């Protein structure tokens, strides 16, 4: 007979944190664009999806209402293009994420979180 412990064990077994690299590998299966358009295609797509996020934010002002789920979906679209662009550049998403965290930690340590320039 199935009890509460079994259900919790089932949930624990079937829920896991998708790693960035796993996501990137899976997203690759739907990355269908001409090889000659690598880098440009996902870079432009990322800009477009970022615009969709901004448009959802604009509608908070216009309609005084947050489309939380819709904005989350647009963030997912951004992630897809980021994964594709990173792959076209020869990086995996985990490395990009870690490098970004390292950079921000360095800036925090150096007191340069605020300010301008990539090489702070
Ligand atoms: Mg979208």
Image (cartoon, rainbow, N blue to C red):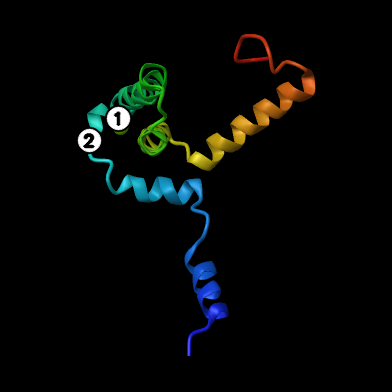
Q: Residue at x 32, y 29 (%)?
A: 42
Residue furthest left as drawn: 34
Identify the mark at residue 33; answer none if there is no mark. 2
- Image location of residue 10, percent across then percent down: 49, 73
Residue 21 percent location from the top left of the image: 47, 47
The residue drawn where x is 71% and y is 21% is: 107
Residue found at the far bottom of this picture: 1
Q: Earlier in the sequence, mark 2 or mark 1?
A: 2
Q: Which mark is residue 38?
A: 1
Q: Position of residue 5 (x, y in %)?
A: 57, 79
Out of 17 and 58, give the one closest to the viewer: 58
* Residue 93 to residue 6: above or below: above
- At numbered mark 2, what does the secondary structure look like: helix, strand or loop? loop
Q: Residues within 10 Å of mark 2 (few under 14, many from 20)?
A: few
Disc 1 beta carbon < 8 A from ligand 1? no
Tell whether 111 sits left or right of 17: right
Q: Quadrant of ligand 1?
A: top left
Determine the residue located farthest toward the front in the rendered image.
64
Residue at 21% in and 33% down: 34
Q: In the figure, 105 relative to 12: above or below?
A: above
Residue 4 on image: x %, y %: 55, 78
Quarter where residue 55 is shown: top left
Q: Is residue 18 left or right of residue 80?
A: right
Is label 2 in contact with label 1 (beta carbons under 8 Å)? yes
Q: Is residue 66 left or right of residue 37?
A: right
The foreground one among 38 and 46 is 46
For label 1, the SS is: loop
Judge the density around disc 1: few (<14), some (14-19), many (≥20) Cα neighbours within 10 Å: some
Give whichever of 20, 1 is nearer the camera.
1
At a point 73% along the width and 15% down the height, the residue shown is: 112
Q: Nearer the viewer, residue 1 or 22?
A: 1
Q: Quadrant of the C terminus?
A: top right
């Amino acid at each position: 007979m199935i009890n509460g412990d079994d259900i919790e064990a089932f949930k624990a077994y079937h829920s896991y944190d998708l790693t960035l690299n796993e996501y990137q590998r899976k997203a690759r299966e739907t990355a269908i664009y001409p090889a000659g358009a690598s880098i440009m295609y996902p870079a432009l797509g990322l800009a477009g999806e970022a615009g969709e996020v901004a448009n959802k934010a604009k509608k908070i002002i216009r309609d005084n209402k947050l489309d939380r789920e819709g904005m989350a979906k647009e963030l997912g679209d951004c992630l897809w293009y980021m994964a594709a662009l990173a792959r076209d550049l020869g990086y995996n998403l985990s490395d990009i994420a870690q490098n970004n965290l390292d950079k921000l930690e360095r800036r925090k340590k150096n007191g340069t979180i605020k300010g301008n320039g990539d090489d702070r």
